[in-house]
Image (spheres, helix red, strand yellow):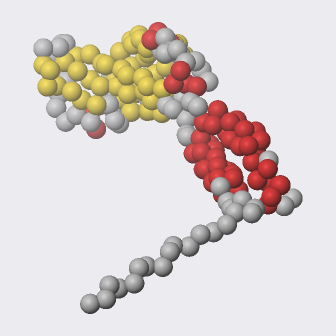
Amino acid sequence: MTISRIFRLRKGVVTVVMLPLLLWCVDLHAFAAMPRQDEIKVTIRTVEVKPSFIVVTYELVAPASESYEVNLVLLREGNASFRVPVRSASGDIGEGKHPGAARQVRWEYAKDYAGTLAGDGYYFEITVTKVSGSNLLYYIGLGGLAVVGGAVALLAGGKKSGATTSELPAPPGRPSQ
């Protein structure tokens, strides 16, 4: 295929190649309806206090195909500054596929909190956030789009056959004194 043939077909190439690539870049999630707030529900069912650990049982109602980040924090009523994040824990905590009815977290509280937990008013706050997937394929697609768009722009914007080049005129001579 010669260059002159490409220039004759460039409008068709731009329409056939560029339009689908631009439509592919449109983020349909931005135009989609917002997900329902009740899609993820979490409820703490029981809290069992043992001499060296605490077992928290919770229920997570959410799509089982997704991954979630589950975090626990120990709080105390009447004391807004008391906040102990649960770190030394095992079980259904952290990132993973945790939906289900009888999920348990075993927390060895002495490793995270040096004080005593005497008295009443302690409670747990559980937070669950959906873990988003990687955007690697999206960025690879955008890179490919940039390469194809650049190639089409080079082919469509080159010299046309029969075009003449013009040079700048010579500067005027110096005035005589």
Q: Is residue 30 left or right of residue 175?
A: right
In percent of width and height, residue 92 lies at 48, 27
Residue drawn at x 67%, y 66% as measured from the top left = 164
Q: Nearer the viewer, residue 62 or 165?
A: 165
Residue drawn at x 72%, y 59% as measured from the top left = 160
Specify the quadrant that holds the C terminus: bottom left
Q: In the displayed structure, would residue 21 be above or below residue 27? A: below
In percent of width and height, residue 133 lies at 55, 35
Q: In the displayed structure, would residue 38 be above or below residue 145? A: above
Q: Nearer the viewer, residue 12 or 63?
A: 12
In percent of width and height, residue 44 lies at 39, 13
In percent of width and height, residue 95 lies at 48, 33
> Can residue 96 be seen?
no
Residue drawn at x 56%, y 30% as measured from the top left = 27
Farthest residue in the right direction? 1
Farthest residue in the bottom direction? 177
Q: Is residue 160 left or right of residue 100?
A: right
Q: In the displayed structure, would residue 22 be above or below residue 42? A: below
Label count reads: 0
Specify the quadrant that holds the N terminus: bottom right
Q: Nearer the viewer, residue 97 or 28?
A: 28
Residue drawn at x 69%, y 53% as measured from the top left = 156
> Can residue 142 be seen?
yes
Q: Nearer the viewer, residue 78 or 54?
A: 78
